Image (tube, rainbow, N blue to C red):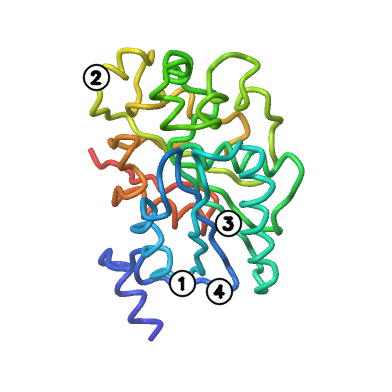
């Protein structure tokens, strides 16, 4: 059997799918973005379950509750549920607003040792769209109270949060379907958040992929990289042969 695996590794077949499954005491909480539902994370959920994780993807009221309530009630309940079920590690994988919810939760709470976090397209330093559109009725109606606190000014929620402990990987995109939004946002962006404003000072690793904000959590490369980070604490880089 050992010789078989050595042979596979030599011919390049020993890939992610050949690795042993992780311990089923590792739980993953999924947090969708603003004005989205748990169904937006379905593809990621299925991929993580296939890799052996126990996944919590219950959703939360992103457009009707303040971010503080989402963090202290909904995310807190999810974490406590994992603990009651005997979770050894509690990872969190977020999209967009979910990253800010997680950072807010970690201001006053901790996760079990060995837990890791992957933030996908998070507005970690705010978004210019919130600066520009927050006073519009349609924006307020669609995004609720959370949409009012995600600006880029120093006093915005993302920019007043303290650094959090833990291994955090950030993935963001550099492709946009909305030229108007991209015109508002300086620099390279994913249609909602600039690459620079997705970064977090205390992040362990950072990755940019050719995907847009709305669909990045279902992008095949992102699915693979999320699992790789949860297992290793960094993203996978493929060396280019010249």
User: Circle 1 sits in a helix, a strand or a loop, which is it?
Assistant: loop
Q: In this view, does 235 lie to the left or right of 212?
A: right
Instruction: Please tell me in which quadrant of the rendered image residue 81 appears.
Output: bottom right
Of label 3 and label 1, which has the lower sequence position? 1
* Residue at 42% from the left image edge and 39% from the top image edge: 35
Whether label 4 touches label 1, CB < 8 Å: yes
Identify residue for label 1: 52
Mark 2 or mark 1, whichever is nearer to me: 2
Whether label 3 touches label 4, CB < 8 Å: no
- The alpha-carbon separation of the residues under discs 2 and 3 comes to 35 Å
Of label 2 and label 1, which has the lower sequence position? 1
Mark 3 or mark 4, whichever is nearer to me: 3
Q: In which quarter of the image is the C terminus?
A: top left
Mark 4 or mark 2, whichever is nearer to me: 2
- The alpha-carbon separation of the residues under discs 4 and 1 comes to 7 Å
Of label 2 and label 3, which has the lower sequence position? 3
Instruction: Please tell me in which quadrant of the rendered image residue 200 appears.
Output: top right
Q: Looking at the picture, how far across and down is residue 33, in whole percent?
A: 45, 41
Identify residue for label 2: 179
Identify residue for label 4: 23
* 241 lies above or below 2: above
Whether label 2 touches label 1, CB < 8 Å: no
User: Circle 4 sits in a helix, a strand or a loop, which is it?
Assistant: loop
Outermost residue toward the right? 108
* Residue at 55% from the left image edge and 51% from the top image edge: 233
Q: How crowded is mark 1: few (under 14 residues within 10 Å), some or many (20 or more)?
A: some
Residue 87 numbered mark, or none? none
Total marks placed: 4
Q: Residues within 10 Å of mark 4 (few under 14, many from 20)?
A: few
């Amino acid at each position: 059997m050992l010789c078989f695996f050595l042979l596979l590794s030599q011919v390049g077949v020993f890939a992610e799918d050949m690795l042993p499954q992780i311990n089923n005491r590792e739980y993953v909480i999924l947090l969708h973005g603003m004005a989205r539902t748990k169904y937006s994370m379905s593809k990621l959920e299925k991929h993580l379950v296939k890799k052996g994780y126990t996944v919590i993807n219950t959703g939360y009221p992103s457009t009707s509750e303040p971010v503080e309530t989402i963090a202290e009630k909904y995310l807190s309940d999810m974490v406590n549920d994992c603990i009651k079920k005997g979770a050894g590690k509690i990872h969190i994988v977020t999209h967009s607003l979910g990253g800010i919810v997680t950072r807010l939760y970690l201001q006053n709470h901790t996760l079990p040792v060995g837990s890791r976090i992957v933030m996908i397209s998070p507005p970690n330093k705010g978004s210019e769209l919130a600066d520009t559109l927050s006073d519009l009725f349609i924006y307020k109606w669609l995004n609720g109270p959370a949409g009012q606190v995600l600006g880029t000014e120093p006093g915005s929620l993302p920019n007043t949060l303290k650094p959090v402990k833990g291994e955090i990987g950030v993935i963001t995109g550099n492709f946009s379907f909305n030229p108007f939004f991209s015109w508002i946002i300086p620099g390279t962006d994913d249609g909602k958040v600039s690459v620079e404003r997705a970064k977090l000072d205390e992040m362990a690793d950072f990755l940019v992929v050719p995907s847009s904000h709305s669909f990045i959590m279902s992008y095949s490369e992102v699915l693979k990289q999320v699992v790789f980070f949860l297992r290793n604490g960094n993203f996978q880089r493929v060396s280019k042969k010249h």
